[in-house]
Every structure is written in C-alpha cells, then in structure tokens.
Image (cartoon, grey):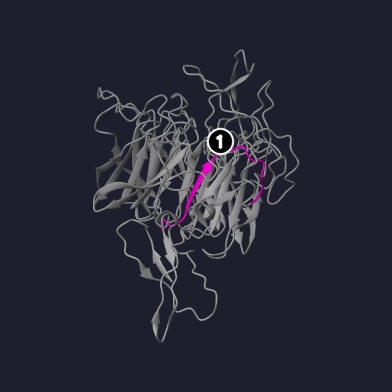
Amino acid sequence: MFEDPDGPGPLPEAQVGGALTGTTYSHNLAGQLLYKRVNASYRLRACDANGCGAFTAALTPDVTKAIGYFKASNNTSPGDFGSAVALSTDGKTLAVGAPSERSKSTGINGDEADAGAQDAGAVYVFTRQSTAAAWSQQAYVKASNTQVFARPITPVGPRFGASLALSADGSTLAVGAPDERSNARGVNGDQTNTDTPGAGAAYVFTRAGNTWSQQAYVKASNTLPKGAFGTDIISANNVLRRHHFGASVALSADGSLLAVGSPGEDSNATGVNGNQDDHSRWKAGAVYTYVRSGSTWAHQAYLKAHAGDEVHFGNSVSLSGDGATLAVGAPYDYGNPGSGQRSDGAAYVFTHSGNDWSQQAYLKISDAGVGGKFGDSVAVSADGNTLAARGEVGFVVLFTRTGAAWNEQARVTGKSSSMALSGDGSTLIVGWTDDASSATGINGSENNSTAVQAGGVRLYQRSGAAWSQRTYLKASNAEADDRFGSSVALSGDGTTLAAGATSERSKATGVQGDQTDNSGPAPYPHIPGYFFPRVSNYGAVYLY
C-alpha cells in the first residue's frame, strides 16, 4: 500500500507497511497527527514474481470521523460541560469541567441524577490505555461540599470545575470552585461553614490505579471571616468582596506544587508574603502556592502584584514542569504607580529556589492599550522558557527567556478566547468562540460568516523564532452559538488537542454519542447593538 500524506501537497507518495500476505490489510494511523493527514490518500497494487499491476483508484478517508466527541454522562440539565479542559502529558487522561452541573452529590462517582444544586459543578475524567485505544469515563468527581448560596432569583453554587489542572502523569487533579462559600483558611479546614459566599476553594484529587479520592480541601490563608452584602434591584442581596480563590489553578509536572489564583482578593500587600489582612485594595488579586509532602499539603507563599485597585492579579496562572517558574496574569494592570504608564493588563513571572519566591519579570506589550485585558490568560512551557499571554481581544504575545531576561518573540494576530502551549513551547493553540465560519472538521474555509459564534481553534507552530498558522480546526458538528474554543488543552508532546464548546446543544451522553441531537435550550437571538446573556447549555469537548 502507498500513502500520499498530504494529497496534492509537496510530500511524496511512499509505501507504508509491509507486503500483503492475505486478502486484507489494515494500516494504523493512531500515532499520526490528525491535522497532518487531512488530504492523505491511499492506493494499492498487486505484485508477484513477475512484477506489479496497476494501482487501484486512490482512497481519501474522511478524517473528521476520527475526531473525538465527549459529553457529560448525566446530561439531564445544562451544565456548561467543557468550560475547562486539561490533558496529561501523554494525552491518555482528559479532565473536563462543568461548573453549572447541578447534582447535589459529593465525592467520587456519586448520584449523577440528584439534581437541584444550582451551579454546584462537576468534573469528568476520561482515560484510554494507549493512543490507539478507545476512551471511556473513569470518574465523576464532585466537591466534598456543594452548598448553594440561595439568594433570591439567582442562586449561586460553588462552580466546582471552573478551572482545572492535571499533573504530567494524570494522577493528580486540581479543581477550582471560585464561588465556594466557607470561611475556612489553609488546608482541610471546616467545609460546613457558609459565612463567606464567593470566597472560593480548590480541591486536590489523586488516583491510585483506577480509583480517585480527594486528598485536600484548599483555602486561602486570609479568607474573609464573613461575607459583605450590598443590594441591587435584581439579586436583592448581592455579595461584595468575592475573592474568587480557585478562579485559576496550576500544578507542577509531579503534582507536588499547586498555585491558586484569587483575582478578587483585596489586600494592600505587594511582592512576596506581605501583610495578608490589610483589606483595602478592591480586587487587587493574589496567588497562593502550596506544596505536598507525602499526602500532606501546606501553604507555601502569598504572591502579589504592585499596589493597585482592580488589577485582578491571579486571573490566570501557569507553572513550568519543575514548578520553578510561575506565570501570573493581571488583565486590569495599569502600570507601575506614579509611572504615568497606562496599558491594558500585564503578565508577571516569579521564580523560586527552595521555598523562596521572587519576581523575575513584569511583562507588558510594547504598544500600550492594543491588547485589551492582556494577561487574561497565560501559559508557560514545561521548561519555563516560553510564555504566551493573551488579551480578551486582540493577539497572543509570545515571550522567550534567555538567562533571566524575557523578550517578546512574536505575536499571533486574531481574536482569542482561550489558549494552550505544548510542553516544548513550540506549538500554540488558540480558541476563539466568536469565529463565525460554518465549516466543520479540519482546515475548512475560514472565509464565511454564516454561523455566528460557532467557534474555531487555530494551531500555530514555531520554526526557529518564527510562528505560523498550520491548522484551522472546527467542531465536527459545528453550528451557530456552540462557542467551540471556550477552552483548549494540549498534551505535553503536542500530539493530542482538546477543545470545549460550552454552548453545544446535544443531549448525547458519554463518548461518541449522537452529534445530531440539537435539543438543548435555544440561544438568545443576535441583534446588533444589543447584549443578551449566553444561555447555559449542555456543552461538549472535541479531541483531535
């Protein structure tokens, strides 16, 4: 059998596999990158001692049928499945967050149908034994406390699963629940207290064999003792000063270092391990680190940006593989006080030796104001030497480190909603939920706008210091308002890619269900000049 890997492209046709010894032959492409085989074609010819006959007609497989399609196992109500995704380094473990899931169950593999807890949230863990094996759900993971703040009209649950991180081997899982409401501090405090809505929490789970269990319940070291409330015409008792600890989480490769972002934290401290209890800076933000010894977790450090209100420091966090480099996004950072500099957001880099952290870099885009909430998301490579930072609108900026010096290397133009880096920092994926192309699958046409907010994902690769787009990905059942690209993740080697579509409407369950079922809630109509809130939906995750 002969394969032409790129159809009309420059790569030559070549024989694959050995000689045919029977009447059938199979050629396994499990180890190949799907986006590199979009136009691949295959031909056969018969040969014997007297020579070879003519080739058969070329066969071009439909590779879109190989795109994985993952759904929650309990699609009884909208859960925003796919709001967060994480992949292990080898691409064999996938975690998916559904922060609007409503089951009241707690712990591992509880009653998925026990609905009634608005925005309680859940995480679904899927695994496969090899890159050629089928996927299956391994665990249904819930917080150990799912209390809902029952304010009038719009109850608020903990939103467990709003952020996720996996260790390299997939055996340690960190989950953020930014609206959790206890006033506990530190590790494994009192979960039953409900005095501080919006304080937030993070949970650590570990896997032994195929069994998952909760290892730690993690809280900020300066959680407010009691929530503050205001009033407005809609909620009647609006929560003020929500710290949202757990809005972002990151793990080192071995899972023994955890970083948690708290973009609503309000102390006036700056730098490392300052005064945590001076609550005079509205939404300044903070990042907390924790270390594990054996199975015991302990608070390590308290990190802050320069002084300022509404910096939202900790909106995103990312750790290098060894945990020695931490990137932190601050999308409302307006420059150093008194400098006169004003730009939309920043990224901070911290490094540590032992337990001692220090700030290494303060990164802003050179033409201030263009990025729009720059630092809304950050990602750092496994070796810590490549950093990507994006804004809510505009472009993704890539920085590289030589020694202790960081320099801007490139910009990837185009709007973005999510992004991820491969372990070696040479592959970048960018999701954009407002992509309006009606194409499906891989490398379809980008040049139409007939499916508003269908969403899309673009893959970029680095050659030397130059970055270029290599692939354009769409959902296999792309439709308007699906918001494909809400979240993205890459395996460490960059060969497995996951993308969430939080507004996908199918009520299918499990893996490879019916993609044509579109019976979920209809979105609000798009009327130019008017804003309508997004309708919570079932959601899906696609794997490439």
Residue 206, horizontal then vertical, whole percent: 59, 56
Q: Is residue 7 left or right of residue 530?
A: left
| Any part of residue 322 in sight | no
Helix, strand or loop at label 1? It is loop
Number of residues whose C-alpha sits closer than 10 Å to that of mark 1, classed few (under 14), some (14–19) or many (20 or more)? many
Residue 397 place in picture, x, y as percent:
31, 39
Q: In this view, does 513 lie above or below 266?
A: below
The x, y position of residue 363, in whole percent, is 29, 37
Q: Quadrant of residue 411?
A: top left
> Is residue 171 rendered magenta in the image?
no
- Residue hosting label 1: 178
Q: Residue furthest top?
A: 233
Per the rendered image, the range of residues in magenta is 493-510
Q: Which residue is drawn at 34% across and 37% down?
A: 347
**Image quadrant where one finds the N terminus:** bottom left
Query: Does 255 sit left or right of 126 as displayed?
Result: left
Query: Nearest the camera: 370 or 229?
Result: 370
| Amino acid type at mark 1 | Pro
Which is more toward the observer, 271 or 234? 234
The majority secondary structure of the magenta stretch comes to loop
